[in-house]
Amino acid sequence: KMKKRVTVLEGSAPLYMIQLAAFRNAKRAAEMTEILSQKHKSRLKGVDLETMRVDNGSNGIFHRIVSVPLSRQDADKVCSILRRSGQDCFLRKHEITTP
């Protein structure tokens, strides 16, 4: 099932984040961010992981473990390396939110 992609240009190219996991519990997400950062240190090639709070309305609040925004090429490369090691991973479009 293909999802339609909408590309928003930021500078010369859109940015992507790698998402490794999501939790309802903020503390658990923070712990797993640290664990995954250490476990995949060499595979992440210097890419930092962080948690991101997302309110999904009626579906509740989730805390995603994501990378800092990367170019599509870099995000694809790191995600492929992580997948080969057995880590779930997918790209998520980085959206700049304005207050």
Image (cartoon, rainbow, N blue to C red):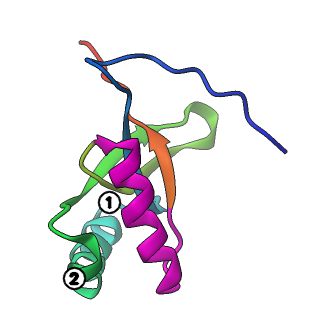
Percent coordinates x, y for residue 13 in the rendering: 35, 25
Q: Which class describes the residues within 10 Å of circle 1: few (<14), some (14-19), or many (20+)?
A: some
Q: Amino acid at mark 1?
A: Ala
Q: Quadrant of the C terminus?
A: top left
Q: Please tell me whether residue 97 is drawn above or below residue 90 in the rendered image.
A: above
Q: Quadrant location of residue 8?
A: top left
Residue range (magenta): 70-89
Secondary element at image label 2: helix
Numbered tag placed on residue 26 in the rendering = 1
Q: Are marks 2 and 1 in contact (CB under 8 Å)?
A: no
The residue most toward the right is: 1
Report, in whole angstroms, how far the alpha carbon at label 2 lies from the one at label 1.
Answer: 25 Å
Q: Is residue 37 left or right of residue 61?
A: left
Q: Please tell me whether residue 79 is drawn above or below residue 7 in the rendered image.
A: below
**Residue pointed to by mark 2:** 42
Numbered tag placed on residue 51 in the rendering = none
The residue most toward the top is: 99
Q: Is residue 37 left or right of residue 9?
A: left
Dominant SS type (magenta): helix
The residue depicted at 34 percent of the width and 71 percent of the height is: 28
Residue 82: say if magenta: yes
